[in-house]
Image (cartoon, helix red, strand yellow):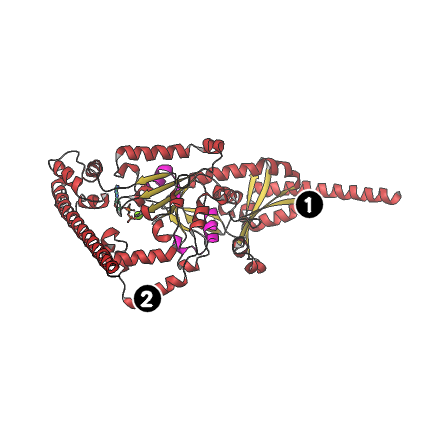
Amino acid sequence: MEASSSSLWSSVNSGIVLSLLAVVWTMLWQGLQGLQLQHFLGRHSRRLSRRLAAALDPYLTVTVAEYDGGRMRRSDAYKEAQAYLQRATREAGGGVRHLKAEPDRDPDRLVLSMDDNEEVADEFRGATVWWLAYTAQPREDAGGASYFWGRAARAERRFYRLCFLERDRDLILGEYLPHVRREGRAVMVKNRQRKLFTNISGDSWDSDGSWSHVVFEHPKTFATLAMDPAKKKEVMDDLDAFRKGKEYYARVGKAWKRGYLLYGPPGTGKSTMIAAMANYLDYDVYDIELTSVRTNTDLRKLFIETTSKSIIVIEDIDCSLDLTGKRKKKKQQQAAEGDGAESSGKDGGDKKDGAEKDKEEEKEGKSASKVTLSGVLNFIDGLWSACGGERIIVFTTNHVEKLDPALIRRGRMDKHIEMSYCCFESFRFLARVYLGVDAHPLFDAVAALLREADMTPADVAENLTPKGPGEDADSCLAALVEALHKAKEKKALAKKAKEEAKNKATGKAKKEAAADEADDDDE
Ligand SMILES: Nc1ncnc2c1ncn2[C@@H]1O[C@H](COP(=O)(O)OP(=O)(O)OP(=O)(O)O)[C@@H](O)[C@H]1O
Ligand SMILES: [Mg+2]
């Protein structure tokens, strides 16, 4: 009994001593703050003060991990805390000595955040909290982790640790943390720079299936995209409906995503249309080079790492699917037809000498991607595709007829948009944009020629671009008319050659049939 009362007495005593010390410490701390001494003592004083505070009044910690629990996506809470702390770091002024700098929206400025092992203090309604940034090395057993789940384990893991006094528990957990997330989101929106992501790193086959990015600054908008006006409006309305369609998609039980298939000859503006879409919606762009994705699992991983409000693009899907086999065939076919360089210019650079080419092909064979059609179908509308929302998937192709119908059926590619050769409407649009003219005596000639010749908007735009100081609308339009005449002749020649080849083929087939018949008769 006595023993218990004395232990009670001693615990009461020690409680009083601790409380007294806490009061003294708080006064000391406030005094230090008042005298601005803390500023001079810098981060060491902060650390010391936190430790002292902890000794007197136990403090609690909350850790925010960049990738937690083997998750595949960066945690939103981490990103928000990071954004919030950028502001807190700036306000802490000289208190934080080691800073990390990243480019800002404003090209002359840098966004500063605290570096590893730095600590910054923050005040919230009279309570002081401390944020510490630190990085943990990869786990030793990470090599054995499955490829799919192990990325977070293999990479350096970054954390923020929030420390606060126990007496502030309710305030911090109930109000401060939601405040940090809200403010962090606001900072992210303010600093948001649109990004263009690619899955190809320096050596594409060394890439660990993750994204690298640059700031997306494409100047093309719908206002400068030449296209049949009705068709353009239809696309823009469709995008608007998608953007505002969160409730609709939830109501009908569909994942909030939409597939667009852009098809048409090279130079008709498919890639340009993607840039215009991204600028219109203010979305990020993820450009997937499918031939650099090793497996279906990697493809899924890439997809999961995309954020919402993004356009996921697979260009030239006919060249990347079923994979390098078809791609090689296409290259050989183009080389045989001799149209590779003319078609888009992008194959024009492929002219390499034999040995180099052989080496490249050998490498290509070794590193053949194992992504299958079913992998891509899963990527578009499998279970995983519903992760996150507000994503647009765009495929482009020059040969829509070669695509597997399963790939482009509605529901996967919801909207098929044909990008065709330049029509008169598109020409007028380009003339207005490039030359600032709405009418000209040569317009009629151009209109007549465009009906007979196939010219892409890219070629029309090129002809309408003044090449020197002496060039004006007259000379540009005259050059266009001349180019259209040539294109018309070329088309007529190509048609004739095609007909001849067809006749030859039918003649040969007839001859063979006749020979077969004669053989049968002989027998
Ligand atoms: N409809 C268009 N309106 C305005 N400019 C265009 C249009 N189409 C093409 N261009 C211009 O032509 C160039 C090539 O266009 P783009 O790369 O979009 O063609 P593409 O259809 O993607 O070709 P490919 O099939 O070879 O990838 C661009 O620089 C763009 O400025
Ligand atoms: Mg393109």
* Amino acid at dot 2: Asp
Mark 2 crowdedness (10 Å alpha carbons): few <14, some 14-19, many ≥20: few
Q: Residue at x 79, y 43 (%)?
A: 11
Instruction: Say which quarter of the image contains residue 20.
Output: top right
Disc on the earlier residue, 1 or 2: 1
Write down the residue under mark 2. Answer: 358
Image quadrant holding the N terminus, namely: top right
Horizontal side of 133 relative to 369 (left or right) equals right
* Amino acid at dot 1: Leu
Q: Does the magenta-highlighted stretch encompass residue 373?
A: no
Write down the residue under mark 1. Answer: 56
**Range of residues picked out in magenta:** 275-304
Total residue callouts: 2
Whether the residues at callouts 1 and 2 have beta carbons within 8 Å, the answer is no
445 or 475, nearer to the observer = 445
Q: Secondary structure at mark 1?
A: helix
